Image: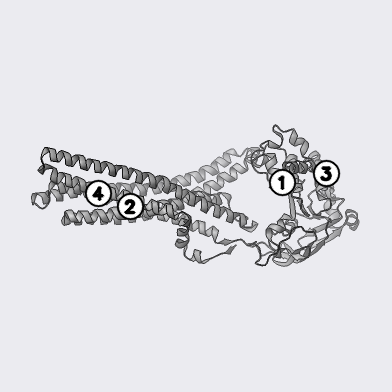
Amino acid sequence: MKQEQSKAEKHPLRRLAGYYKPYLGLFWADLFFAMLGAAVTLFIPLMVRYLTQHVAELSLEEATGLILKLGAVMLVMVVVECYSNYFITFYGHTMGARMERDMRSEIFGHYQRLSFAFYDNQKVGHLLSRITSDLFEITELLHHGPEDLTISTIKLAGAFVILLFINVKLALLSIAIVLLMLVYAVVMNAKMQGAFRENRARIADINSQIEDSLSGIRVVKSFGNEAGEMRKFNKGNNRFVESKTRSYRYMAIYNAGMGAFTTLITVVALIAGGWLMMQGQLSTADLVTFLLYITSFTEPVKKLVNFTEQFQNGYSGYSRFLEIMRIAPDIADAPDAVSLEKARGDIAFDNVTFHYQDNKENVLSHVDLTVKQGEYVALVGSSGAGKTTLCSLIPRFYDVSSGRVTLDGMDIRSIKLDDLRRQIGIVQQDVYLFAGTVMENIRYGRPDATEKEVIRAAIEANAHEFILSLPQGYDTDIGQRGVKLSGGQKQRLSIARVFLKNPPVLIFDEATSALDNESEKIVQQSLEALAKNRTTFVIAHRLSTIRNAERILVLTEHGIEEEGTHESLMQKNGIYASLYAMGAHTA
């Protein structure tokens, strides 16, 4: 895949900061209340110091008045702190959720633009983890990071200045222990991060395996392989637990050490403070105040270390996000691409050669083919001959390696991609229906279609009768991938979708090969009705279904080796006759 690198991506932190832009008002308000809450926590111990220093010197009446006044001020400060915490928790998280939404929308939109070549080499579970757990880590950083930095800086700097003001010796002793605490935290945090990265890789593997197993649950059950799937899952799950156990060991050492350092500062402050009191260099009020500030002094260290962990988690998730965003769609509109409202349907392959990106061996070599408007062309050949690949080049699911494909004489690369694909309807062997109702699935062919137009399309596809027999008719929920319908019913819904789209060019990719004889007959009638007056390419599995085709092309690894009607190809007694005889023998 091509790699895209814009100015923003050369400066990823600048791009990351750009997600704040729509929410700057909320962002600055969040920081303001973070600073306000931090200031309140710093101010209250000073009021305790003032109270303990002066109340003993006052008369009962004066002391009572002072206590009441200071109490009232502190109650107001509690309310301010309470609202500040509410604001940064609620509005801060809301801002984070909105940024997560924006990033998820961005990466999902990017997924939609990437070509088949990208998805050929990706696991859905890994793509899902980029859009879920990775984005959560990023937005946790975007939301909590600035808050934690602001609160920690204010508390750490403020507490240190105040402690220096109270007693320089005690403050310097405490800061020495805090520095040791910081070094310990950074070292242990670095060890934790390796384990956390491994955790994310393991959970992505589990997601991928679960998605694969659940998507193929019918195959699993039909082969009785539940135990095998469980073994595969348990293997990945146990690897995840092993990596989690390693990270939890480091986490336990980290938390135990940080707790010990916090207690150590208190113990050292008490011992040193007691000694200083004996020397007359420290008052009782100052020692009490000092002890109150120790939490304000050590808590920011933990927050700063947590921020480095958060930053590493978030930034590694952001790096994975950028990995995807840097992949440029290799199928995209040319700068001078033109619009095409309605095509006639003339298709031509001009000296077309094609090979997949990760394989230099040609699937198609120097193919020349002209199909006129309204022609019905069948493609036959052994598996791997390139029939599906040839048809996939028409809607530009892949681009030709050399040569060109034209629609109405225009190189399809010069036509806007949306307009090109609007001219083409595809009915595949493996029908994909979305979770939802019958109406929603048919309307997928043209989202703005009216209910009458949807019903007309269903009638044309021979689907109306069976739809009316469903419990809620067109409003019946068909389950994930249409699991509640038979193969023939699903295929007729997919044909109705294409009837509604009403394109001038059709591709039938072995559309009846997976059906029983009765369903095949009904679906074949629907396909013939759909193909009337449209340029049609049929990839045939059962050769009996294309006997009446105007042209039959026989593809091999050498290209188009035979061409003609059924009768003329049978008279040649070549590859087609051999394939037909083999099909008749095995039928």
What is the distance, in whole Å, between disc 1 and disc 2 at their CAs?
55 Å
Residues tagged 1 and 3 counted as in contact (Cβ below 8 A): no
Crowd band around label 2 with a 10 angstrom C-alpha radius: few (<14), some (14–19), many (20+): some
Crowd band around label 4 with a 10 angstrom C-alpha radius: few (<14), some (14–19), many (20+): some
Residue 174 x/y as whole percent: 21, 54
Q: In what quadrant of the picture does the C terminus appear?
A: top right
Q: Which amino acid does the dot numbered 3 rest on?
A: Gln
User: At x 17% / y 47%, what residue is drawn?
Assistant: 50
Q: Is residue 557 left or right of residue 84?
A: right
Q: Which residue is mark 3?
A: 525
Q: Which residue is mark 1?
A: 449
Q: Nearer the viewer, residue 323 or 243?
A: 323
Which of labels 3 and 2 is toward the front?
2
Q: Which residue is mark 2?
A: 35
Residue 36 x/y as whole percent: 32, 50
Sequence order check: which comes first, mark 1 or mark 2?
Answer: 2
